[in-house]
Amino acid sequence: MSITLNKKFGKVAVLLGGKSGEREVSLKSGAAVLKALQAQGIDAHGFDPRDKPVHDLEAFDRVFINLHGRFGEDGCMQGALEMLHLPYTGSGVMASAIGMDKWRTKLLWRAMNVVTPDFELVTATSDFAEIEKRLGLPLFVKPANEGSSIGISKVKAAGGLEAAYKIAAEADPLVIAEKFVGGGEYTVGIIADGKGDFKALPIIRIVPKNEFYDYEAKYLRDDTEYLCPCGLGAEKEQQIQKEALLAFKAVGCRGWGRVDFLMDEAGNHYFLELNTSPGMTDHSLVPMAAKAAGISFEQLVVRILESADVG
């Protein structure tokens, strides 16, 4: 059966792959988006910036960014597309760069009274024992500029921070230690509402079967549970959705994204990090939340593409 060409968006490049440690996830995300766009008659084409020069994008009218990690999610690609004056999906240069950097996101959130778990910047010369004492055990150690849980360790025993720091530093020289919050992991997907503002999608609770929501739990295992409704109660969910939108806007984000948060045992929530180019695989959270809101995957990708902008 032939599909009528949808000329509304012109020729669309779906950026996928790239050069970061999240390349394989990006290839899967991009393939799913490409298939969904083409199924709706949109003249979409895959474009891997690892293999093609960026200036080849001048042949396109609009860009759907499905790159994750460095050189795709951190403002680099966004800056190149600004120079080409090509509308692209997701956040702009500044918000992408800040959102990729967990440390600077937390600094900004703290200044804006967005509650986030206590954290410390860790260097090779840090007093590891003192940081363990201040934050308490267990604690998490993570590279500030990586996604998909790459380089993350959970330190459970005294004296373990130094080794965890070295693992994280292999992925990024900027490393943070973060206070453990153990009441559950959750996420809020955010999309443009078509009226110049944003809509928070239903909250999802993530229940991994291993120690925490690591790379394996995110992409390789089939036993991770995703609960939607999330079980927080309507009033609490609405409160967190409202605050997630504020956290999203505080960084200057646009288009779409995801804000992750933790709950403690007393029912308090703490915003953890921001994702300005979320995954779109069969394990990904924004499509799950959109489905719960009555938005199909194909409808979701079109809504995201409609929000593409420059500047």
Image (cartoon, rainbow, N blue to C red):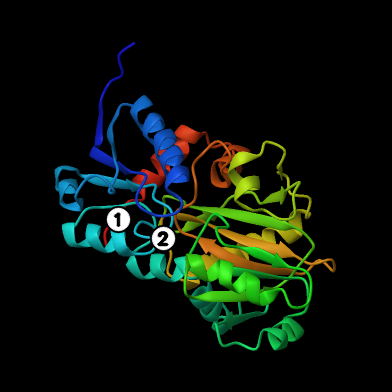
Which three-letter amino acid code belongs to the residue tagged 1? Asp
Comparing 138 with 267, the one in front is 138
Comparing 55 with 124, the one in front is 124
Report x, y in % for residue 13: 27, 41
**Quadrant placement of the C terminus:** bottom left
Give the image quarter of residue 288: top right
**Residue 309 bears which disc, if any?**
1
> On screen, 147 above or below 137?
above
Mark 1 in CB contact with mark 2 (< 8 angstroms): yes
> On screen, 223 above or below 128?
above
Which three-letter amino acid code belongs to the residue tagged 2? Arg
Judging by the rendered image, the residue that carries numbered circle 2 is 254
> On screen, 17 above or below 180?
above
Comparing 215 with 127, the one in front is 127
Give the image quarter of residue 117: bottom right
* Residue at point 53%, 81% (across, down): 107
In screen coordinates, is 95 left or right of 189? left
In screen coordinates, is 74 left or right of 269? left
